[in-house]
Amino acid sequence: MREVAATDRGTHTRYALSHLDVLESEAVHILREAAGEFERPAILFSGGKDSIVMLHLALKAFAPAPLHVPLLHVDTGHNFPEVIRHRDRAVGRHGLRLHVASVQEYIDRGELRERLDGTRNPLQSVPLLDAIARHRFDVLLGGGRRDEEKARAKERVFSLRDTFGGWDPRRQRPELWQLYNGRHAPGEHVRAFPLSNWTELDVWQYIARERIELPEIYFAHRRSVFRREGMWLAAGGWGAPRDGEIVESRVVRYRTVGDMSCTGAVDSSADTVGEVIAEITASRVTERGAGRADDRLSEAAMEDRKREGYF
């Protein structure tokens, strides 16, 4: 952003950072701090918009060197095909290392059991913690933002996890002047969130500015869906709909993506980034409030999962 100011000695140009420049600078700083403080970092990457922005920032943070940090995806087996295709394209395009922890494999081995409600999001903790132990990751960089949900609003940028992967809000550390404490005991690890101070609107405005490619699922398209508990869920390979739930063909888009069993679509005609930004600007409902059934299980649903090792 450029400003022209007049003084007694003439005019001069004064430069000021836009809010997106400030957020980008902070995120790059956090990524570099994590890479400097920890020995074995990894980036949580699902192919969703926040993790795509995270990857874009990581590529910037360590350029011109290639990105040395591997990616980790906990695959529920019920992910949207469009998102998985985008994940694999991104990995191939940048020559990255991707580790996949599969919930389906744990179910097949009898180490996890399907839930009665069909959702697999809460089943991700065990494969995630096993992957952390197997690869000896000491910090995981995730795309969580404070505006998404109450528990995430309470979390620090560097979030200490105990030897069981659990999050205890009482052990949160002060983070004054952008000083981040990554100290941890053997067996513990840290989750770091470079997008903590971003909002959904910030993410989309950054996507527009940087011309970042996203899966087509984020834009208006026609899809077979059915209504459950006030949400449009996708019909398909995860064993739904139930008896009495009527499948309709509707023009929808997704504000957030995850397990198909608990990720709802919203009615929308927004099929460009600009139209999505206009839609979000007018919305009074958060993306997780609009589209995540697993966050509706209880007031503390997310916090309970985080105490068990969830993202």
Image (cartoon, rainbow, N blue to C red):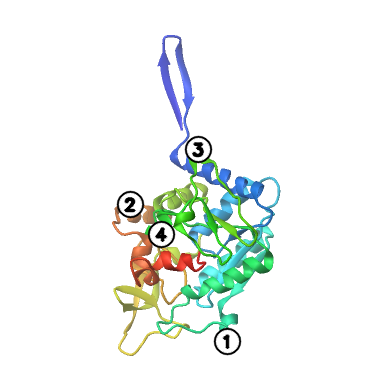
- The residue lying toward the viewer, choosing from 12 and 158, is 158
x and y, in percent, of residue 40 in the image? 68, 57
Question: What mark, if any, has residue 110 been given in the picture?
Answer: 1
Q: Is residue 213 visible?
A: no
Q: Name the one closer to the observer, 7 or 41.
A: 41
Q: Position of residue 133 (x, y in %)?
A: 65, 67
Q: Of the residues tagged 2 and 1, which is closer to the observer?
A: 1
Rendered image: mark on residue 177: 3
Find numbered disc 2 in the image and state the secondary structure of the residue it sits on.
Answer: helix
Is residue 244 something that shows in the picture? yes
Q: Residue at x 35, y 55 (%)?
A: 280
Q: Amino acid at mark 4?
A: Ala
Kind of residue sitting beneath label 2: Thr
Give how far apart the Cα atoms at labels 2 and 1 are: 45 Å
Closer to the camera: disc 3 or disc 2? Answer: 3
Q: Are marks 1 and 3 in contact (CB under 8 Å)?
A: no
**Crowd tier of the residue under label 3, counting other residues whose Cα lies within 10 Å: few below 14, some 14–19, many 20 or above:** few
Q: Which residue matches tag 2?
A: 281
Q: Position of residue 230 (x, y in %)?
A: 29, 73
